[in-house]
Amino acid sequence: MIGVGEKDGSRRAFADLVSASYFSVMGVAPASGRAFLPEEETPGSSARVAIVGHSYWNKRGRDPGLLGSPILINGRPFTIIGIMPEGFTGTTGLFSPEVWLPLGVYDQVANNFQAETRYSLGDRAGHQLLIVGRLKSGMTAAAAAPALKGLAANLEKAFPVEQKDQTFMTATLSRLVTSPRPDPIKSQVSMLGTLLLSMAAVVLLVACLNLANMLLARGTSPA
C-alpha cells in the first residue's frame, strides 16, 4: 500500500514495484507514455517516476495532460510517465494496482510494518520479491525442469544458508495475469521460484529474470 496525495490530504492505494522488463514480459505496453528504463530499476537510483492505471486516469477525467504531471506518493513527488490500458492489472488481479513504480525507489516507498527486520533488495535473506519469467517459444515445462533443477542446486552450493532447499518450478499464471485483450503470451508466462513468494504488504515484482538464456525469453514484447 502507498499513500497517494489528493487535494484534501491523501488516500491509500495499491501499488507494485516492478522491473523495467515487467510490462514487456506481460505483453502489454502503456497505452500512453513509456515503460520504465533499466537505469530506473537499479536499487538506489531514486528515479521518481510512476506509471498509473487506467482507473487513475479515469478519476482525473481522462486528462490528456496527465503525462508529465506530478503525483504525490508517500509524501514524495513523482512524475507520471505512462498510463496503462484499460483492464490491465498485471500479476495481482485480486487487488489491482493503481500505480506502478520502478524497483529503484524501493527504499523510499516500501512499507515494512509486518516484519521485524527490513531487508534490502540485494539481501538473500529477504523474501520481498516475486520473480516472473516467460519460457521461450517452443520450450515446455518438462524440458525446462532439468536445467531449473541444476540452477537451484548451483545456487544452494554457492549460498548454502540463504538458498538452502532451493526449488524452482513452472506454473501458469492464468488465474492471476490479466490483459486488456486476448494474448497468447498469457499462456506462456510462468511463475518461477516458490521460495521467493511473499505475503508482504507491497508485492515486489521482478519480471523476466534471465535464469538461463537457453530457457527463458528476454524481456521483450512478442512480435
Image (cartoon, rainbow, N blue to C red):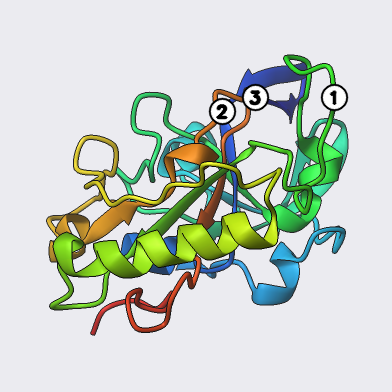
Q: Are marks 1 and 2 in contact (CB under 8 Å)?
A: no
Tell me the kind of residue under disc 1.
Thr
Q: Which residue is mark 2?
A: 14
The answer to which quarter of the image holds residue 24 is bottom left
Q: Are marks 2 and 3 in contact (CB under 8 Å)?
A: yes
Q: Position of residue 164 (x, y in %)?
A: 59, 43
Tell me the kind of residue under disc 2.
Phe
Q: Which residue is mark 1?
A: 117
Residue 174 shows in the view: yes
Q: Which residue is mark 3?
A: 1
- Horizontally, residue 143 falls left or right of residue 169, namely left
- Horizontally, residue 70 falls left or right of residue 132, namely right
Q: Is 198 placed above or below 156 here?
A: above
Q: Is 102 placed above or below 61 here?
A: below
Say which quadrant the N terminus sits in. top right
Answer few, some or many: residues within 10 Å of disc 1's Cα (few below 14, many 20 plus, some between 14 and 19). few
